[in-house]
Amino acid sequence: MQRRTEENHHRQTNTRPMKKNTSSSAGTIQQIIPHQSRSILSEVEQKAQRILNHNLVLVKHHGKTYCRTVPSKQYYTHQWNWDSATVAMGLVHFHPQAAYDELRALISGQWENGLIAHITYNPDEELYYPQADKWRTQQFWQNGVPTSGITQPPVFAIGVEYVYDHSPDKQAAEAFLEEMLPAIIRFHEHLKTYRDPEDKGLMTIIHSWESGTDNSPRWDSVYAHVDLDKIPQSVKEDVNLHRVDDQIGEVSHRPTRENYYRFMGLIDMYAKWDWDYHKIVARSPFAVKDILFSSIWARANESLARLLKKVGRYEEAALYKEWAKQTKQAIAGTWDAEKKQYTDIDVSQGRKEKIAEPTIATFVPLWAEAVTDTQLPKLIENLTDPKTFWTPYPIPSTAINSPKFEIARYWRGPTWPITNMFIIEGLLRYKDRHPKAEQLAEQLIDSTLEMMIQNDFYEYYDPTHGKGEKFNQKEIKEPTLHFGFADFSWSAAIFISLYERYRKH
């Protein structure tokens, strides 16, 4: 693998250093960055651009060169599906060609059946576990590009639409769109065929990694059905020998060893079933109708419909608009009025059990515009309750009053810029239907930007703004406001996107 080093040929940005902000107290972004001077915001954006440049790698497969942005060179040294689609949304604001290249690289290994895998592997990078060979997917690799065997929330179409809409050169954008449309359509047809075999609108995931919220409490009851005693000893030994995220990162922040046995046990099972998704969905001990994934699916079909209309393909656009409508209605039907949230459904091996863990997933239907007028005030009441989700750095991935909330453990408490962005966009869809929706979106934009200004571009953050001693942080040795890996591409890209759209002018 080659690192991109050529000057002036690839991504360029101003390289002035960012001013440090050492304040640890909460405050509005207007207090930190006075309205009359936005120089700090500009400097932070420049640092975000430098991070995206730093995390770029050049990869060669069978004589072709691909430009990929890895999430963080500290550990995540490959290309992730929904990370990449979001990264392109930041890149387009300062280097549109790089945004095109990012999404081209994402589909370089798209399977013949339409799957866009959750990881597209870079050769000669062995730091991340599991490595490409652990998936045993070689027979499906296209163009010599190694991939995993599962997918992630389908942000791809949304990213393509965003890049198209924000590209300054419309001729280049139109050529790019024509190139992307076949891949989007194949991906959406794949998901509809294999993940909604009932044709009811909700998407089935077959691994918690597909949800994007890998270690969420949403999956605890499902993983309880993955019997540790039935996982091959060879799988456990492989985890014990090769897993490194809990050594590179803080062990108390990472998924448990037992959960990794389950993660890898599922992969081993699916490989033995030759990645037959009909069989996997029907027989796996992990099969869940995921509200977050389904919400993004609905939103992605809206994007695909609009993109098809842009090129005059109106009949095809109508199909994907109908898929979006079907999913919205199905999401609304999962509402639990007593808990004021949407619920996932465990459909593993014939089960039909609601999962009502209070997590960030319940707010993503806002982005799909799937929330009914009856449900909306109750959902926003839940969102704005300081005892659950409206924390100093909203929005925690698990409600802070949940017994499963952990302030620093991966997806079990910390706040992530990516999910904040989903909810910001969702609230803005409801600005004419709820008196507080636009105001809340504005507050969330400010708090998300402030979080990154004060704490730099990390993977995720403490939602309690340093007041974590009230909660479960028994194993945290020193209080900190940021967690995970540094120089994180997702966070940098989301900062650029939010700043450019909402705060630059």
Image (cartoon, helix red, strand yellow):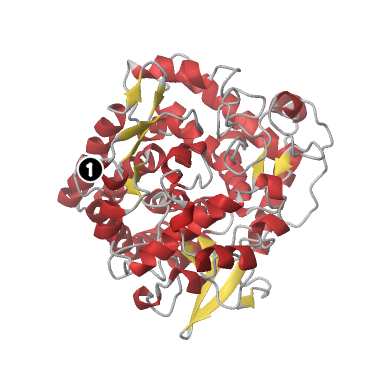
Which x, y percent locates residue 125? 61, 73
The answer, for residue 247, to whether it is visible in the render is yes
Residue 495 at x, y percent in the picture:
62, 43
Q: Identify which residue, 213 or 317, lies in the foreground.
A: 213
Q: Which residue is mark 1?
A: 323
Q: For this rendering, which residue is in front, 369 or 223?
A: 223
Q: Residue at x 57, y 68 (%)?
A: 238
> Does 505 appear above or below 259?
above
- Where residue 150 sits in the image (x, y, percent)? 40, 59
Viewer can see residue 118: no
197 sits left or right of 165 in the view: left
Q: How many marks?
A: 1
Residue at the image point whose x is 64% and y is 47% from the top: 459
User: In the image, residue 214 lies at what x, y percent?
Assistant: 51, 47
Residue type of the residue flagged with mark 1: Trp
Quadrant into which the N terminus falls: bottom right
